[in-house]
Amino acid sequence: MAKDAFEVVDHLGWTAERQLHVIGVSMGGMIVQEMACLEPQRVASLSLISTAAQLMNTIGYFEHLRRRVEIFIPKSMDAQLAEVKSRVSSIWLSEPDADGGFPTNGDHFAAQELKKRQDTDGFTRKGFLCQAVAVGWHKKTADQLQQMAEKVGRQRIQVMHGTIDNLITFPHAAILVDALGGEGAGITNVIFPGRGHYLPLEERQAFRRLIEAMIEKTEAL
């Protein structure tokens, strides 16, 4: 998938060094790690959101096993919506809809999920299973991340994570930051207390400011 992304940007003519501001959320964060390892000289900035170098058991064996098994068990639509909603802050869900079209963020979020899951051509079980396998197979070692960080430049890399993320749990962020070299070496580490997996939704304004600030900083390097 990283190579697919490079094919797209190559087609657009974005081939110069330090031209790409790369942002990846969750599985997307794993894909952009691969991109940065493949062609680090093309990366102007690298933002890794709610992601991991590899999935690890941070919640105990049986709870980890239960969650992995539940991914593949068919559920009612209500149960699916409840599960997806559990990945974001309950406070954010209860707040007024940021776009104004629904009573609350939770109502808007549920409507988007319903629309997606009713699209049987675009949201297939095969696609879901392939995504789960791809995420499970992703692995970047500490040595690989160290080399990537050196070639990209640590001042060009930021990691963001919510403390109540229950999909890719918060300890994954600390492991990733440490493997990249740590804050003392220049990695930007942004922690969102009380926020879950979908930071671009839960912290829309702060997320935008952080991305804009990283782009501005790295364009000046």
Image (cartoon, grey):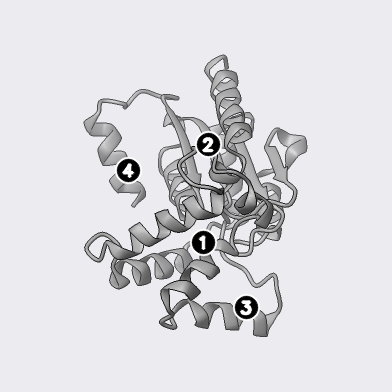
Q: Quadrant of residue 153?
A: top right
Amino acid found under the numbered disc labelled 3: His
Amino acid found under the numbered disc labelled 2: Leu
Reading the chain from its start, which is encountered first: label 2 or label 1? 2
Q: Residue at x 54, y 69 (%)?
A: 82
Question: Mark 3 or mark 4: which is in front?
Answer: 3
Q: Position of residue 204 (x, y in %)?
A: 57, 37
Amino acid found under the numbered disc labelled 1: Lys
Measure the alpha-carbon separation of dots 4 and 2.
Answer: 14 Å
Label 3–label 4 contact, CB within 8 A? no
Measure the alpha-carbon separation of dots 3 and 4.
Answer: 31 Å
Q: Residue at x 59, y 82 (%)?
A: 65
Q: Is residue 100 above or below residue 142?
A: above
Q: Which residue is mark 4?
A: 5
Q: Quadrant of residue 19?
A: top left
Q: Residue at x 47, y 62 (%)?
A: 138
